[in-house]
Image: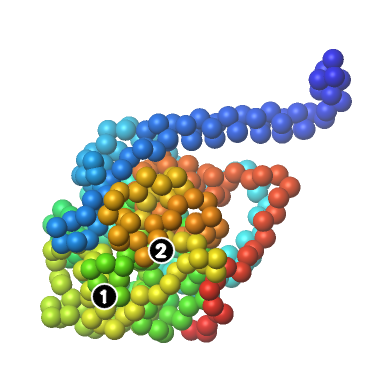
Amino acid sequence: MAFRRLRAVMAPSVRHFVMGLSVGMCLAFLVFSYVQMNYGSTKMIEVSKDGGVDGNKPMSHEEFDKSIARANLPDVHLTVDKHMHHDDDAIARKLSEQVRVLVWVMTSPDNLKSKARIVRDTWAKRCNKIIFFSSEDNASFPTVGLNVPEGREHLTAKTMKGFRYVYEHHFNDADWFMKADDDTYLIVENLRYFLSGQNTSEPVYFGHHFKTIVKQGYYSGGGGYVLSKEALKRLGEQGNNTKVCRQDGGAEDAELGTCMQNLGVRTANSTDILGRSRFHCFDPETHLFGGYPDWYYQYDANGAKKGRESISDYAISFHYVPPEKMLSLEFYIYHLRPYGINSGEQDLNQQKRLSR
């Protein structure tokens, strides 16, 4: 009876809101459950013979890509959110003008319709400039071909040629230059906030820090690494010297790390003021709940921590994110809202902001 009386006095607009909220929560739960059943338990990392982090066991990268191709990913076309959000994005828009970020994504012809397409239609839209590099040109996607054969044994060549292309064609288009994979999810606003406390004129780069192989350590390729303007300048001017930088072979991220060290480009701390990680080489669930492979405990420079208190509120990147989980993250981060809560901004950078 009480419910009937309440329903009778509720305005139609309120009833519609409640009904829409209920349906939305159900859909969100179903999406999350589907993603967890299909992708939540995927483990894909192993250590290469060269000592770098190459892929995932028990499933290789090639097997991972094939499994995504077999998943019959729906042909989702993301458009402007039609719901009436009232977010105040003035700070984010201001940072977009002050901290210009170019991101280039390493992909392949076979991944354009699955992984790369979803990257293009989600977080890539928030970059100041985005470039997709592949082994061949594709004007309709578009991708820039690097004339490098496909295969993990050639990722170092892809990386070196990708950064050289950016240096030669887009050096003045951005202040920071980031490499990511087509299964990396990037929260661009948080990247800009972190970089706003750094000086792009310094020879420095940032990412998920591994402490082995290279004296100063190096950064996970899949977690993404971002070079300052000075770092890119040194790589562009001296990176073709085979005595300084390996041009192909080996583990891409470790080889780039050795190259950076030889060029005098230093690694630096990217944790927030509470010591929590921002760049991540696994998906969110792995960093939340653990289950790391054995090698990770020797590699991770931040102690291989897990749990909510180890991940920054302003996390920047996650890796091994398949397309449907990427769509889910896009929904959770930019659409789903708890009513009546305005989280505001936190000052989580380690140091005072430096002028460029």
Q: Which residue is painted at 48% across and 35% down in the image?
A: 32
Q: Secondary structure at mark 2?
A: loop
Residue 237: % across, % down? 24, 83
The one nearer the camera, 34 or 293, is 293
Name the mark on residue 319. Answer: none
- Work out whether residue 344 can be spotted: yes
User: In the drawing, does residue 313 fall left or right of residue 100?
Assistant: right
Q: Which of marks 1 and 2 precedes in the sequence?
A: 1
Q: Is residue 72 above or below residue 265?
A: above
Label 2 to label 1, Cα distance in Å? 16 Å
Query: Which amino acid lies under the numbered mark 1 shown in the image of this protein?
Result: Lys
Q: Nearer the viewer, residue 166 or 152?
A: 152
**Horizontal and vertical percent for residue 244?**
17, 80
Q: Give left or right: position of 201 versus 141.
A: right
**What residue does disc 1 label?**
215
Q: Residue at x 52, y 83 (%)?
A: 354
Disc ID at residue 302: 2
Q: Secondary structure at mark 1?
A: loop
Looking at the picture, how far across and down is residue 205, in whole percent?
37, 74
Q: Residue at x 48, y 78 (%)?
A: 198
Give the image location of residue 276, x and y in percent: 50, 62
Going by the numbered disc 2, the residue's amino acid type is Asn
Quadrant including the N terminus: top right
| Left or right relative to 242: residue 173 | right
Residue 344 quadrant? bottom right
Whether residue 161 appears in this view of the structure is no
Q: Residue at x 36, y 82 (%)?
A: 203
Label 2 crowding class (10 Å Cα cut-off): few <14, some 14-19, many 20+?
some
